[in-house]
Amino acid sequence: MAQYAIITDLNRCTGCLACTVACKAINEVPIGNFWIKTLRIGPNPKEGGTGDWPDVEMYFMPVQCQHCESPACVSVCPTEASHVLEDGTVQIDKSKCIGCQFCAMACPYGVRYLNEEERVVEKCTLCEQRISQGELPQCVAQCGSRARFFGDLEQGVDSFEAPAHPDSLDTGYDDMVTTRVTLKEYVEAYRESDIHHLTNVGNNPRLMYLLRQSYGDHRDRTWQGEE
């Protein structure tokens, strides 16, 4: 069975917030709430540098539900509203949710919130309504810098896909969204050691981040949750 995830190439992400806006639009996320938050990491001194501009560096990092292998939010849910599907995504059955917010408190990444109007907890679903039809999550489909790729962990991260860039096609938007490129064939070369996860506290987050430059000790602190 497929085990779905997203990898974000942080060397390509420009912090444009297209993923955040596209997610809010298609999922009708309430004003003031977000399923994806784009964080700015830095600016920080370059390794061995003075720390004065322009001897600094920074990057943007979209953070959302990590669709963990062993999600704490599922283990604390008293009604089994939070659950893991066979495809590895973590979902919420709103008909079972009582709004207790135990899951929101248990999440190590702070990516759940209470919908005040419906009194149920919400979060990123990895656009389950789209991927079940063979489409890409909206945040992947609308990433203008082609920094986000979606795929099956069972098939390997090299095979993760994004829409083809319009500059590579002779036709228009419709062809772009139906033509796919893979992470390996499209982005700059990377090593396995360039692929990172958010801090693992026993939940085994599935979503990945690609960052090639060393960024000195600062990058190590980011992935260990010290920011």
Image: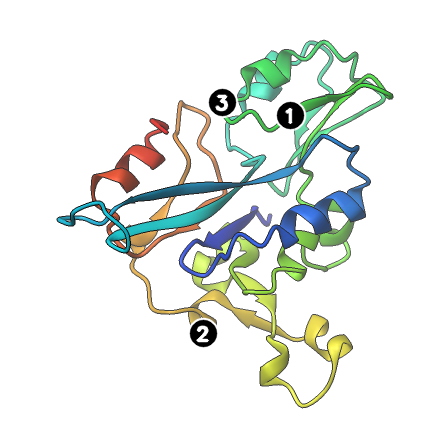
Label 3–label 2 contact, CB within 8 A: no
Image check: 110 left or right of 199? right
Decide: few, some or many residues near mark 1? Use Cα within 10 Å; few <14, some 14-19, many ≥20: many
Image check: 218 left or right of 125? left
Residue type at mark 3 is Pro
Secondary structure beneath disc 2? helix
Foreground pick, 3 / 12: 12
- Among numbered discs 3 and 2, the one appearing first in the sequence: 3
According to the picture, the residue beneath numbered tag 3 turns out to be 108
According to the picture, the residue beneath numbered tag 2 turns out to be 185
Residue type at mark 1 is Arg
Q: Quadrant of the C terminus?
A: top left
Decide: few, some or many residues near mark 2? Use Cα within 10 Å; few <14, some 14-19, many ≥20: few
Using the rendered view, name the quadrant where residue 51 is placed. top left
Classify 147 as above or below 185.
above
At 56% from the left edge and 64% from the top edge, which residue is drawn? Answer: 161
What residue occupies the far front of the structure in this picture? 53
In x, y percent, where is residue 181?
A: 55, 72
